[in-house]
Image (cartoon, helix red, strand yellow):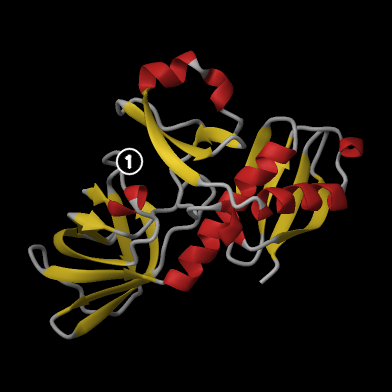
Amino acid sequence: MDALFREDSYARSCIATVTAVDERGIRLDRTVFYPTGGGQPGDIGLLRFDGLEVRIKDTVKGDGGPDDVIHVPEDGQELPAPGIAVEAEIDWQRRHRHMRMHTALHLLCAVVPGSVTGGQIGADKSRLDFNVPAESLDKDAIATAVNLLIAADTPVGTRWITDEEMAATPELVRTMSVKPPSGHGRVRLLDVEGVDLQPCGGTHVARTGEIGGIEVTKIENKGKQNRRIVIALKD
């Protein structure tokens, strides 16, 4: 399967061919739909064929490796058969908010020292959990620092390294809860130029300025040296 979202986060639709349909959902030979992973929700949207529309309520990973993507339809719909050509279109407004949020979390990760113990991306609010003492965190100072990085309008890009290069540079991994996807020959890095570089398979904006500004809504104590920072987009 050709994972178009991995090379172009801005691709909103594509023409694809159905390769399989089963109780889990619909597989295509190529897709713009991002599957749930790394704290980022799977895309929703539509598959169009023969004048019909199939509403996709979620996108998940299958068991056949990182490029095995399953489009989960809402119940009670007529589904396309294998071999049928479809137009796959994501809910762009929702995806773009996820892109802005995901990149903002990388900036948050650059501002707050300490390992990341968990995280979740949402269209309305997102969070990262850090292994840091509570007294080291100031809500207003964190928001100011992140917004300065956003205002700098820094380029955001991706590049690939081999599994061997990843194993030789373990300091690139900031997240304790999610291991980078290795064993497939290469690992994708998210590079916020001069700010943050770490393994990430998610979708992102092209420049930090596109995030548009964030606020830190709260900082929660989630256990010994485990602090949750929740952010929201300003618009």
Q: Amino acid at mark 1?
A: Pro
Location of residue 174 (image quadrant): top right
70 or 96: which is nearer to us? 96
Q: Nearer the viewer, residue 109 or 131?
A: 109
Look at the image and tell me in which quarter the C terminus lies: bottom right
Q: Quadrant of residue 213?
A: bottom right
Q: Position of residue 145 (x, y in %)?
A: 77, 47
The location of residue 127, given as percent across then percent down, is 68, 51
Residue 41 higher or lower than 199, as above or below: below
- Report the residue at 88% width, 46% height from top: 138
Residue 153 makes an appearance in the image: yes
Residue at label 1?
Answer: 66
Left or right of residue 132: residue 32:
left
Q: Where does the image place residue 162, in percent across and percent down from the top left?
A: 35, 23
Percent of width and height locating residue 17: 13, 62
Residue that appears at 54% across and 65% down: 97
In this view, which residue lies farthest toward the front?
152
Q: Residue at x 80, y 47 (%)?
A: 142
